[in-house]
Amino acid sequence: MLRIGYCWNVLLYCCLCSSAAAQSFNIRVDPHGTAGNASTAWSIEPTTDGRFIAIVAADYYDSTFQTFSSSVVTSILIDEQGTVLSVDRVVDPVHATYPGWSNSTAKRIDGGLVTGGGNFRLDSLDNWVQRPVLFFFTADGAAEGYVELGPDDQEWIGRQAKQTPDGGFVICGETTVDELQSDVFVIKTDAVGNEEWTNTYGGQWNDYCKSIEPRPGGGYFLGGQFRVTSSNRQIWVVALNDTGGVLWDRTWGGEFEDLSAHIVSLADGGILVAGGLGYGTNGPYRRYLAKLDPTNGEFIWQREYAAAEAECVFHVAHEISPNGDIIAGGYGRLNLNYFGTLLRTTSEGDSLWMRNYQYYDDIITNGRGLFRDVIPTPDGGFIACGTALPVTHADTLLYTQDVWVVKTDSMGCIEPGCHVITGVETQITNLKNVLRVWPNPVAAGSAMQVCVELPEGFAVQGQLRLTITDALGRLVQEQNIPSTSGTIPLSLGEGLGVRGIYHLHVSDAQRWISGVSFVVE
């Protein structure tokens, strides 16, 4: 139901221009089509033909076995327009399955995917039994099978897997030592999943490992969190040799808990670390990136970003080819509002832009959104995945938590040109019908009507405004929108005197709300 409406007549003055931009979209997906289920995308990978595969943990009811699983590893194939093409899943009638942690999936040598995760069940004494698992998918996201690893007598939590140069695999995670202690593990397998060696690492308290990366020249890097005292955890990076022996390990941080490190290797051999630094008991935190020397773990540089927030972290970061820039993804929280975050930096970690993404649609009207993974895309943009859910269960009759996928251009914009809107770093996603223009295309020199219709109950933060940008991302014109409904003439100046593609944006003082493209003939 729409209650707030504004309409304008726009006069256009045009001649010739064109430019290609990265395809953008934002979607909320329930992979099983049943309201009330919970699902989260933990990783996303590109296919060779421009599509994307999201690897998801989702509730699932198996009608064949008449069993309900609190989590089933699921793949979603999405095309470059954001259309869901197929959904497949790993169904185990005995175990629930889960796809590890952020960026838990990697490309295989043959073009398929491997996901590091695990399964779990209750034994006859109602004790949890968890095992690490390698899940395999084809290049199109079809489930191929899985291999269980480790003993079947204690808790083993798989987080991430990678294929090794010899065709085998490594998986990392945590395993229980006793009721008070967990250690980090690494399991190395051959090409078909036979275990070759298993090592554990850690101190006297609970330690965590969220990522593993092949080390140039052989061996591996681990990224995680080490408990240095009974009340404090710090960032932890470890270098291993080919058989899992420790070459060096390093912890760093402050007097408060710091959040677990995600690591990747860079083209120059350096180690990129993503995480968060603590600034108080149970927060607040600041987003954090660092680059380490691979030979000894010493800092090449380290950076913190934005102000401290109640919760915030970078779950993942990747290098952007060919210039070596960095894209990092995670989330933040202010009060009850969670939002996905993307940051682009130079190769030295200097911020180029940072944007927040808040979920909002007809179902989730006061939404939370979190990003768990982000990767660069071949068109120069980025694609992020995670989960969208209401702030409280009262938001909908059937509480829903769904997969959230956002594709942006190189500037982090859902609609190209958002970056020129002064003072706005947050974008609301999925308000697709807020802004309408017609006719489209529009003839040069004629009038075009623009209408804004905001959802009932939508809380505008400050002055509403319209912004027009051209196909090259340049500001053409901005105009404040009156606070009352109605139709007003709006003449555009000579900045719109170029034929081609334009982008119209509506925003308030704090947020980009929606956008639409139009063509001048």
Image (tube, rainbow, N blue to C red):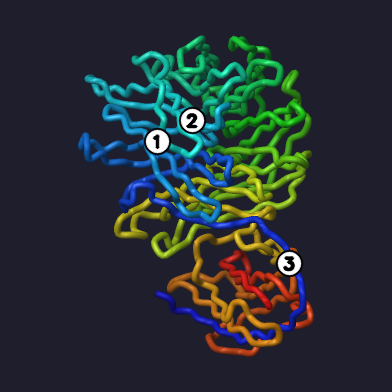
Residue at 44% across, 33% down: 99
> Can I make out residue 275 in this image?
yes
Would you call the spot at circle 3 few (<14 residues within 10 Å), some (14-19), or many (20 or more)? some
Residue at 37% across, 27% down: 119
Q: In which quarter of the image is the C terminus?
A: bottom right
Label 1, secondary structure: give it: strand
Would you call the spot at circle 1 few (<14 residues within 10 Å), some (14-19), or many (20 or more)? many
User: Residue 148, labelled with which disc?
Assistant: none
Q: Are marks 3 and 1 in contact (CB under 8 Å)?
A: no
The image quadrant that residue 505 belongs to is: bottom right
Instruction: Say which residue label 3 marks.
Output: 18
Q: Do the residues labelled 1 and 2 touch (CB within 8 Å)?
A: yes
Relative depth, front residue between 405 and 122: 405
Looking at the image, tell me whether mark 3 or mark 1 is earlier in sequence order: 3
Label 2, secondary structure: give it: strand
Looking at the image, tell me whether mark 1 or mark 2 is earlier in sequence order: 1
Relative depth, front residue between 439 and 370: 439
Q: Where is residue 500 in the image (x, y as percent from the top left)?
A: 71, 72
When the figure is inspected, residue 390 is found, relative to residue 433, above or below; the finding is above
When the figure is inspected, residue 337 is found, relative to residue 466, above or below; the finding is above
Q: Distance between the residues labelled 2 and 3?
A: 41 Å
Tag 3: amino acid: Ser
Tag 2: amino acid: Thr
Q: Do the residues labelled 2 and 3 touch (CB within 8 Å)?
A: no
Would you call the spot at circle 2 few (<14 residues within 10 Å), some (14-19), or many (20 or more)? many
Looking at the image, tell me whether mark 2 or mark 3 is earlier in sequence order: 3
Instruction: Say which residue label 2 marks.
Output: 115
Q: Position of residue 172 (x, y in %)?
A: 52, 22
Instruction: Say which residue label 1 marks.
Output: 73
Relative depth, front residue between 169 and 487: 169
